[in-house]
Amino acid sequence: MHALHSSLSAAVSIRNGPARASGSPRGSRVNRASASTETMATSAPARVLPSLLPDGSGGGDDAGIYACLFDMDGTLCDTDPLHHEVFSNLLLAHGKNGGVPIDDDFFHKHIAGRTNEDIFADLWPELSVPEREAMWEKKEEDFRALAASKLQRLPGLTELLAWIGARGIRKVAVTNAPRPNAELMLRALGLEQYFEHVVIGTECARAKPHPDPYLEGMRLLGAADASRCVAFEDSPAGATAAVAAGIPTVGVTTSQPASALEDVGVSLCVMNFAEERLMLALESRGSREDEGGA
């Protein structure tokens, strides 16, 4: 089994335990992707981050990074507080939760990582499907109104994206968010021209936690070798999708504890992109055996 360079071996977690069925609070219209994270990610091994050559090209086992694939919600920016605020206001307006604002426990139990269909069916069982759909469309509008003025890039993201661009590494955004949300986030972050493509999970045959969105991202970039790609994800469902596509994955702990991401097979967890060990990992010779074995 490979590990990262020995200087980073402690930062890489090889996990063979069952996945946790949790994720980030991004509701979207997904009937085709209802499989749980547990189903997709049981006994997922961590992938080795590939090494980097200056131009991101070349051949052989040590060829370097060809492409980076980024989730958006919770990865490029921390959107959980905005989703929490929008849902809290909506529930208060409809007299739910005893007429008091929801707390973090409620948010993670009833909202985080679930589709709009499931969230609204559970919280508003008395409404018809068309009524729920109209409500969640209004919820998405409210989210976009907040996001337009409040979104900020995660620390270190600007520097990482410049580093990727300077080396000719291909890049794509891969998200389960509705396309209007994705486009709004990119505009708010000043990244509408950065990514070569934006893959929307609900426009694929299956959304995350299935690997289809990441496989589509690789296809669009002409990335034939998943081991020469790196994915960045903040949720177990998203990380499950990336790992299932064979992509070495960095977990970003904006919304989940590191253990929840390690359990589905990420290679490294960081709080944000400013952590020095992230760059050390990306620049290390990932194909080496750890000096301690294993």
Image: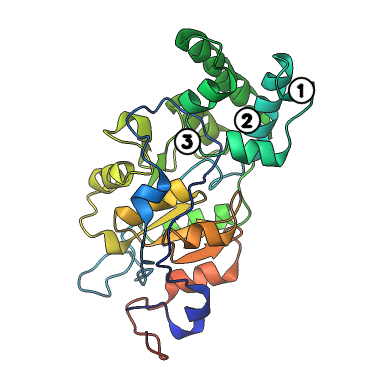
Q: Which tag is nearer the camera, tag 2 or tag 1?
A: 1
Q: Secondary structure at mark 1?
A: helix
At x 24%, y 54%, the residue is 223
The residue beneath circle 1 is: 98
Whether 149 is drawn above or below 291: the answer is: above
Packing grade of label 1 (10 A; few <14, some 14-19, many >=20) is few
The residue closer to the viewer here, 66 or 110, is 110
Q: Is residue 171 visible?
A: no
Q: Which tag is nearer the camera, tag 1 or tag 3?
A: 1
Residue extending farthest bottom:
291
Please state the horizontal and vertical placement of residue 284, each as a whole percent of the image: 42, 77
Q: Which mark is residue 262?
A: none
Q: Look at the numbered discs 1 and 3 and tell me whether their residues touch, using CB distance below 8 Å.
A: no
The residue beneath circle 3 is: 192
Dot 2 amino acid type: Ala
Q: Which tag is nearer the camera, tag 2 or tag 3?
A: 2
The residue beneath circle 2 is: 147
What is the total number of numbered labels drawn onto the structure image?
A: 3
